[in-house]
Image: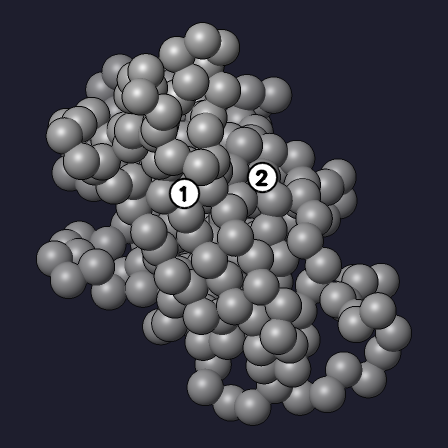
Amino acid sequence: MSTNADTKFEIYISKDTFKFNASHFVAYPGFRERLHGHSYRVAVKLIGSHEIGGDGYVLDFGCVKSVAKKVCKEMNEYFLVPMLSDVLKITVEEASVGDGDVDGNICVPCDESNGRIDADGPPSNAKKRKRPYPGSVTIQCEDGSKFVFPRQDCLLLPIMHSTAEELAIYVYSKLLQGLNRDYLEKHGVTAMEVTVSEAVGQDAMFRRLIPHCDENGEAFNVANYITKDPIPPMPCLTDTEAAKPL
């Protein structure tokens, strides 16, 4: 005879719409990848109990699909910036407001006759033409390399490395926020597993119990999941391309 301990319901959702394109590079002491990108895919598993809800669900598939699509859309077509990196010096300049313009534009001298910017200063018939200043993100690397990206092209993430493993932690936190912790608990959902794939057959999974309370954000502080032990030397060959000086 089956007992409660023998029974557990789970649902798994993986759709073509759970995807985002992004660029990144992984950096840690003594190593940096070359800048590159992936077509990431996301999958979600919800682990319930020995019973399902009165509506017959562990959780409505449609609810999970709606939230996961939104999270992926918010991450699509950005450069992923690991703001907690211990080897990258990251400087963020947000969009600034130009003189006399409350919409974040700056004014430059413009030749009234043809709209050409006059580098020598405004002539007597000059008028002011507005253009936006979007801000920037500057990344100084351990190896001396320097990257400057437009601010609006960057997604600033609370992670240490832009690996699939740490992205899975971030995606988990966003899914939990969208699905609502209390609602999951009332439906008997006890744990969630998030898979982030960089390519077919190249997956990272993060599974943890649904946190009952996370007032200080410690459940998704990536530093809590990263060992403080020294990185051991790699004994095997790797296909990962390291950035090398010319």
Left or right: residue 122 versus residue 11 is left
Q: Label 1, on which residue?
A: 151
Q: Residues within 10 Å of mark 1 (few under 14, many from 20)?
A: many
Q: Amino acid at mark 1?
A: Arg
In the rendered structure, find residue 200 and report the number of the disc placed on it: none
Q: Is residue 23 left or right of residue 236?
A: left
Side of 118 where 219 appears, left or right: left
- Evaluate if marks 1 and 2 touch, with contact meaning CB atoms under 8 Å apart: no
Q: In percent of the image, x 82 and y 84: which residue is there?
A: 235
Q: Which quarter of the rendered picture does the C terminus lie within? A: bottom right
User: Which labelled disc corresponds to residue 22?
Assistant: 2
Query: Percent x, y for residue 53?
Result: 26, 25
* Circle 2 crowding by C-alpha within 10 Å: few under 14, some 14–19, many from 20: some
Residue 206 visible, this orientation: no
Residue occupying image coordinates x 35% and y 55%: 92
What SS does tag 1 mark?
A: helix
